[in-house]
Image (cartoon, coloured by chain):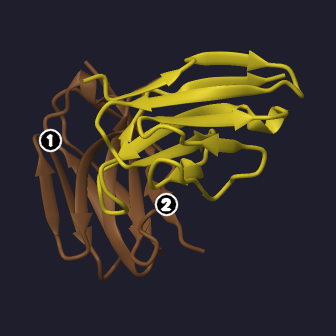
Amino acid sequence: NAGVTQTPKFRVLKTGQSMTLLCAQDMNHEYMYWYRQDPGMGLRLIHYSVGEGTTAKGEVPDGYNVSRLKKQNFLLGLESAAPSQTSVYFCASSPRRGAGEQYFGPGTRLTVT
Amino acid sequence: KNQVEQSPQSLIILEGKNCTLQCNYTVSPFSNLRWYKQDTGRGPVSLTIMTFSENTKSNGRYTATLDADTKQSSLHITASQLSDSASYICVVSELHNTDKLIFGTGTRLQVFP
């Protein structure tokens, strides 16, 4: 099993450009999450999904959209990138809600100039 | 505001030595407390998960303790190895919103030969 994979690993965008980050998991997990990690701060939840076709806002959802069309995939979109969105983005999945362990992907390092 | 604070921010030890990392939290009531290890450039990997009723949990050379009364947890690493060099993150989940994980900023541990 590959676990949780993320593409791309690195990306540089200009302000105003758009892009989509892809997260895929092969563990048949119901729940998936997108976080961002910034220096000096803990990981913060952007959006999450409790099942195929569902999404919900996390702590810092502004400027991002997500979709969960297939159970194994969770996409994070930036419609108009801003320098404040420069960060490392992590996707995670878990087999059950809340108390269950979350398995993280390797991360995507995004720079917006 | 629910917070998770970790100390020290960084720590340098020699290979073979023991060390203890601290986590204080204000999340109340909480559901569980987790410790994650994050290698540079990688996603976090779970070390231990403890519910509020557990006092200690071990995973090899890693032992986590929890005092729910004082809202403190510690992670003790025994006989450190070079591969222990990483950031260690304390994470607390709220009881009434178990989808929400509150992450500490981590302790960066460096183990030198």
Chain letter matching colour brown: B
Q: Is label 1 in contact with label 2 (beta carbons under 8 Å)? A: no
Identify which residue is drawn at 75% across, 36% down: A85
Foreground tag (1 vs 2): 2
First along the sequence among labels 1 and 2: 1
Identify which residue is drawn at 51% across, 49% down: B105
Mark 1 to mark 2 CA distance (whole Å) = 26 Å
Q: Position of residue A113 (x, y in %)?
A: 84, 22
Chain letter matching colour yellow: A
Q: Position of residue A16 (x, y in %)?
A: 89, 28
Q: Position of residue B37 (x, y in %)?
A: 34, 39
Q: Quadrant of the N terminus of chain A?
A: top left
Q: Residue A65: name its quadrant.
A: top right
Q: Position of residue A41 (x, y in %)?
A: 60, 48
Q: Which residue is mark 1?
A: B78
Identify which residue is drawn at 20% across, 26% down: B81
Out of A56 and B53, give the one closest to the viewer. A56
Q: Which residue is mark 2?
A: B102
Badge 2: few (under 14), some or many (20 or more) residues near its Cα, within 10 Å?
many
Would you place residue B87 above or below residue A42 in this image? above
Q: Chain of mark 1?
A: B
